Image (cartoon, grey):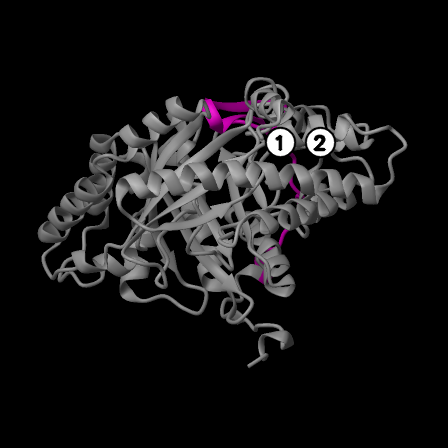
Amino acid sequence: MINENYILETINMIKLYNLDIRTVTLALSLRDCMDSDVNRVCENIYNKIKKYAANLVEYANELENEYSIPIINKRISVTPISLVGEACKNPDYVKIAKTLDMAGKEVGVNFIGGFSALVEKGCTRGDNLLIESIPEALSKTDFLCSSVNLASSKAGINMDAVLKIAEIIKKSAEMTQDKDCIGAAKLVCFCNSPGDNPFMAGAFCGMGEPECALNVGVSGPGVVRAAVEDLPKNADMSVLANKIKQTAFKITTTGELIGRKLAGRLGIPFGVIDLSLAPTPAIGDSVAGIFQAMGLEHAGAHGTTAALAMLNDAVKKGGIMASSHVGGLSGAFIPVSEDAGMIEAASRGCLTFDKLEAMTSVCSVGLDMIAIPGDTSVDTIAGIIADEMAIGMINKKTTAVRIIPAIGKTIGDSVSWGGLLGEAPIMKVNGLSSSAFVRRGGRIPAPIHSLNN
């Protein structure tokens, strides 16, 4: 028998608390697109994307209407392009980038990810060429996103690549200064990057993935906040955690239903559901709002890291009970520019850069969508990245850095991109030099627990 309370609860989740399917992402292998001629590579890539993604947006829109559940983004992720272009006699990664962007526009997706390289242990010729091309590629495309994996718990941290990526981030910002440095907002570096992540800018189709698959990212910070607010103010931590688990279970079930329906219509396998709580700049759709519902005055107060740890764990436990195919990042995101509550906390000085770094030890990703002064040195950016890679490496978790040096701007200013990327106040970073350390080069060895065979 259908319980009318469940129906009303689902309607409220969608209409009042911003429950949505944040993304459906078609993961597509491009390994069979390799060729010695870059023009043929581009032709192969274009044709394959057109073939597999031709109906992605149309079918997603149909399901959105049938089930009255918003699907915010339709995306594509592809094999790391450093691998695809490496077979060319004369690789032209910018040309490949433009091809990806053009194909993505023609099939109607919002973003296409996978302009990526995996260099945690070292760089090949193709890796180096792709990394060098990132600033130009991002400045000459609209929907393309780029990522580089710099570290892992097995390999350690490639400090040569860390320093190089710091330079690339700064250059990407400079080349898109007229668009509030959006190039840097479409570039993320990782430790332990997963190959089935549906969220941008880090999505790519990993080497262990099938020919194609449909990965889904759900979101519902507003739903979790409302559930927490419904509890008595004196409810203890166990009751609080259980309520979050129950809510995550419902959110995950909804996401997998839509994902499997869409995969079936496309005639491709269902991949994973990523049950990350991904906020938006919309009022009420904020992870920071969950902290306040838990009893903290604002994000950044002492206790925020503990609250985030409990939230992240409860979301994972609730989601894993709802689906046997949980993957990607899965947990709670803490992007500054994409979360109205985080924006407010950072603007008021409640949330500092160092506190954000501490929080990344227990969240799903890391330092995400943080704007810093445009005159921040490359060496300081490299130090920030190295710290975050170390947190991921030691804790055997995914961590990431997506920071935007706001060229020409400083503390008190802000950057704004609109949409899901939102806006961000310029945050203060530590002014002490880390140059002599980050320029030593080489590789920080993997921790002892990497020897677990």
Residue type at mark 2: give it.
Ile
Looking at marks 2 and 1 on the same chain, the residue that comes earlier in the sequence is marked by 1
* Residue matched to label 2: 290
Q: Are marks 2 and 1 in contact (CB under 8 Å)?
A: yes
Marks 2 and 1, how far apart in space? 7 Å
Residue at x 31%, y 58% (from the top left corner): 210
Residue at x 62%, y 31% (from the top left corner): 221
Residue type at mark 1: give it.
Pro
Q: Is 151 left, or right, of 430 in this rendering?
A: left
Q: Does residue 413 show up magenta in the picture?
A: yes
Q: Is 156 left, or right, of 37 in this rendering?
A: right
* Residue matched to label 1: 221
Residue 340 image offset from top left, x and y in percent: 62, 24
> Eyeballing the image, is 5 above or below 267?
above
> Eyeballing the image, is 309 above or below 56?
below
Q: Secondary structure at mark 1?
A: helix
Q: Which residues are magenta?
A: 409-437
Q: Quadrant of the N terminus?
A: top right
